[in-house]
Each structure stands twice: as structure tokens, then as C-alpha cells.
Image (cartoon, rainbow, N blue to C red):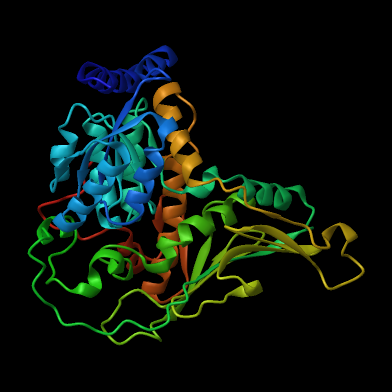
């Protein structure tokens, strides 16, 4: 896509925000056959998996640039892209240079969570479509700012990387729950048991590797000495950068726990858990955690364990809807229904009813995003969806950190307990304050 079209999309977004006309929106879309230029920011893990889906031959996508603070990862991923596509992308260590490139139509944000809000908002300001990894945000305050930012530019799409929203069997399971086939459902369980063989040892602080721009990696997070336990994959287990298993997996699983029950925000949240397996100082988020969310007509329970590998119903992860006639369990492999043990209420149609997944998900999620850019197709995981589940997951973590039952005031977007509400906002590094919309 050329630079004139790039500028046109940004100007159209501004105009649409002012007058909201459908013809203006359709003009801002690329034509169905036009190539889309993308850049990946954060290349190590899920971000690169996303990029590979974007670069599927049928998607007509060019990788214009890669950006990462780790030069070794950057060079390695550049070589992989060149092998896949025959073209070497531009390489950056500073994401702001990516946003200045007029040949880039969309950015994939695959960084640690603490960067998501700042990068997404500034990318929209630069006129880029955004595919941002989950959880969409790292605080409740960020969620609301990100929703406002997207509304400012309605012609620009933001797809949250909650790819189960593009996976058919999850919706089949939800339809069964909604149908009443299970009878009344008053208990919903969601869980992840990671199955790590060994706990992490505590490590001493050290110098950052010479090939890493550590100050840029920290960005909005508080300034800390480098520690290998905080870096790369392990950022997940520190409050400065993420929210543990709750936000790593919880946003996927709790999302369908909410969707299937036609519910969003809870009335109250009760915490449980702690650090039991790992050495003191090795991680900060809990390695065993529970959260009990109370809704008017049901309870939703979250469980996680980093070291155990086998969870409820013999599954390492999943969501269970416990009804009076039977229980439906869904995970990434498919769904199945278990009959209630009472012969008086179970029906023969429950026996052995199951369905495996369709092998869809990430690829379909990416195609949906590209179809928004080209055709204006509705997004499967827009910012509102990403914000709702990020908030619910954050509430579970805040309850854990607060240490008591707390209550959510949805009308005023705050926790009723003042001491707990302080956790809805982050203490940003002064160099990288959250952009206000």
C-alpha cells in the first residue's frame, strides 16, 4: 500500500470520527486484492507466530519491518522472514521509527504486556491498524484509554490477539450452554495448570546483555536492575510487566466463561492463593491462585497452578459449565458433555456427546483482521471485547493483592474499596506516561 493511501486512511479516520459516515469508512478500506504492509514489534514469541499467520501466501501481505530490543532475536527473525518471503525487512530497535514508516499499514504488537497500551495508542495516532497481543492492557485505567483511542479513529482497526474468538468449536459450546440443554447453570469453572517440572530458582541481579536495549525494554515500567527471572518469557510472573497466569491464560478462558453466560462484570471478587512452589524472590505473581467471581445468578471460579499439570476433569486447561442436567467442558481440543450422575434428570443424548476442534483459530483471526482492513468486515475481538476481559482478569489479580473480598462498581468504573482501587492504575516511568485521549 503506497504512502498516499497511508495518509488517506489516517485522514479518513479523523474525518469519520467527526461525522461517522459509512461511505467515508468504506473509502478508507484497502481494495480486496491490494497488498498490506505489516510490521512486527516484539519478535521473540507469540508475536512471531502471529506474523507467520499474516505471511501465509493467500493473505497478500508484505513484512516491511521488524522491531525488537534484543538484537540477536531481531537478526534471527529477519533471517527467518527472508527465508519465508525472499525479502529482508527493515530492522529497528525503537518502535517509534516503525510508526514513522509510511509503507506500513498495520503493526503487530507482540511485546510484554506493559507496553501494549502505549504502543497501541501511539500507533493509532500514527494512522496504523493494530493487532495487539492479549491481554490488551496491563491495568484497568489502560483499558478505558485504549477503548477511547480506537473510538477516536473508527476507520482504523484494533484486533486483540484473543484468537479463540475466531475458533468455531468455542461458539458451539457456548450455544449449548445458552440453549438450556444443560439445565440451570449456577457454577462455571475456568483453569490453567501449566505443568512446569521444576520451580524457578531465585537469581541475583546482573548486567543486562550487551545485545539488549534494556532501558527500552523497561519503557513505561519502573526502573529496576536487570534480572534474568524478569526477562523474556518470565516477564509474566512480575506485576511490573504482567499479571501471571490470570492474564496470560485467563483472558482466553474467562472470556468464554463470560460470553457463554451472557455476563460481563461481577458484583464481587474473593481471592485465594499464594507462592508455594517457587523460591522466595524467584517470581512475584502467585503460582497457585483462585478467584471467585459472584454474579447475580451464578458463581465463576478461576484456578491456576504453575507446577501441577493435570486440572479438573483430567484436563490441563478448560472451562466447565456445571448444569443441573450435565456438565459441558471445553478446551482447545474441543468440547464434551458429561451426564449428571442422577438417573432422574440426565438424558440419553448426553452420553458421549463431544466434538473436536476444527483446526481454526489464529489463522482465521488474522484473516478477519485483514478483511477489516480490506473490506470493513466486523472484527472478532475488537477493543471492547479485549477491554472487558482484561478488566475482569485484572479484578481477580487485584483481589489477590488486596487480600480481601472486594466489590466492583461498574457504573463508576471503580472498585468500591479505596485501597483496592489503587491497583487499577499503574506507576509509570516518568519518560513514558500513558497517552491520554
Q: Is residue 321 above or below residue 175?
A: below
298 or 13: nearer the viewer: 13
Residue 410 visible in the snapshot: no
Residue in the image at 16% along x and 58% along y: 72
The image quarter in which residue 437 lies = top left
Above-or-below relation of 279 to 14: below
Q: Residue at x 37, y 73 (%)?
A: 402
In screen coordinates, is 67 left or right of 378? left
Tell me residue 427's x, y (percent). 20, 61
Given the current orientation, which residue lies at the most extreme top position?
A: 23
Query: Going by the picture, which residue comes out furthest to the right?
Result: 344
Q: Is residue 1 left or right of residue 179?
A: left
Residue 423, given in percent of the width and then of the height, sits at: 32, 64
- Report x, y in % for residue 379: 47, 34
Q: Is residue 66 visible?
A: yes
Query: 269 or 326: which is nearer to us?
Result: 326
Q: Quadrant of the N terminus?
A: top left
Q: Give whichever of 78, 102 is nearer the camera.
A: 78
Residue 305 sits above or below residue 428 on the image: below
Q: Considering only vertical position in the picture, is 394 above or below 39?
A: below
Residue in the image at 24% along x and 52% along y: 115
Amino acid at each position: 500500500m503506497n504512502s498516499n493511501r497511508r495518509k488517506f486512511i489516517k485522514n479518513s479516520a479523523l474525518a469519520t470520527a467527526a461525522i461517522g459516515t459509512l461511505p467515508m469508512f468504506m473509502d478508507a478500506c484497502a481494495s480486496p486484492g491490494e497488498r498490506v504492509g505489516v510490521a512486527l514489534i516484539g519478535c521473540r514469541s507469540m508475536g512471531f507466530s502471529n506474523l507467520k499467520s499474516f505471511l501465509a501466501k493467500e493473505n497478500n501481505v508484505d513484512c516491511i519491518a521488524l522491531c525488537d530490543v534484543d538484537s540477536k532475536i531481531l537478526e534471527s527473525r529477519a533471517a527467518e522472514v527472508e527465508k519465508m518471503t525472499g525479502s529482508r525487512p527493515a530492522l529497528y530497535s525503537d518502535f517509534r521509527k516503525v510508526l514513522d514508516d509510511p509503507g506500513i499499514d498495520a503493526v503487530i504488537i507482540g511485546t510484554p504486556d506493559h507496553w501494549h497500551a502505549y504502543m497501541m495508542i501511539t500507533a493509532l495516532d500514527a494512522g496504523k491498524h493494530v493487532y495487539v497481543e492479549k491481554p490488551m492492557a496491563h491495568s484497568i485505567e489502560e483499558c478505558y484509554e485504549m477503548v477511547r483511542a480506537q473510538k477516536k479513529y473508527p476507520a482504523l482497526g484494533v484486533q486483540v490477539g484473543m484468537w479463540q474468538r475466531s475458533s468455531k468449536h468455542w461458539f458451539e459450546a457456548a450455544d449449548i450452554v445458552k440453549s438450556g440443554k444443560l439445565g440451570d447453570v449456577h457454577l462455571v469453572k475456568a483453569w490453567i495448570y501449566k505443568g512446569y517440572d521444576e520451580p524457578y530458582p531465585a537469581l541475583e541481579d546482573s548486567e543486562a546483555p550487551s545485545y539488549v536495549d534494556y532501558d527500552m525494554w523497561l519503557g513505561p515500567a519502573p526502573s529496576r536492575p536487570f534480572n534474568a527471572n524478569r526477562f523474556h518469557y518470565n516477564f509474566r510472573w512480575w506485576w511490573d510487566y504482567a499479571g501471571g497466569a490470570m492474564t496470560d491464560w485467563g483472558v482466553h478462558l474467562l472470556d468464554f466463561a463470560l460470553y457463554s453466560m451472557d455476563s460481563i462484570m461481577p458484583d464481587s471478587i474473593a481471592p485465594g492463593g499464594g507462592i508455594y512452589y517457587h523460591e522466595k524472590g524467584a517470581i512475584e505473581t502467585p503460582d497457585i491462585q483462585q478467584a471467585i467471581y459472584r454474579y447475580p445468578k451464578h458463581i465463576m471460579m478461576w484456578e491456576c497452578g504453575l507446577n501441577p499439570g493435570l486440572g479438573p476433569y483430567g484436563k490441563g486447561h478448560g472451562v466447565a459449565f456445571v448444569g443441573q442436567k450435565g456438565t459441558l467442558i471445553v478446551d482447545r481440543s474441543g468440547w464434551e458433555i458429561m451426564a449428571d450422575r442422577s438417573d432422574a434428570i440426565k438424558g440419553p443424548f448426553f452420553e458421549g456427546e463431544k466434538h473436536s476442534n476444527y483446526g481454526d483459530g489464529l489463522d482465521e483471526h488474522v484473516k478477519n483482521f485483514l478483511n477489516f482492513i480490506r473490506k470493513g468486515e466486523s472484527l472478532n475481538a475488537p477493543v471492547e471485547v479485549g477491554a472487558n476481559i482484561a478488566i475482569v482478569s485484572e479484578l481477580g489479580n487485584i483481589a489477590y493483592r488486596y487480600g480481601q473480598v472486594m466489590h466492583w462498581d461498574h457504573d463508576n468504573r471503580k472498585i468500591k474499596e479505596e485501597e483496592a482501587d489503587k491497583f487499577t492504575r499503574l506507576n509509570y516511568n516518568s519518560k513514558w506516561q500513558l497517552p491520554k485521549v
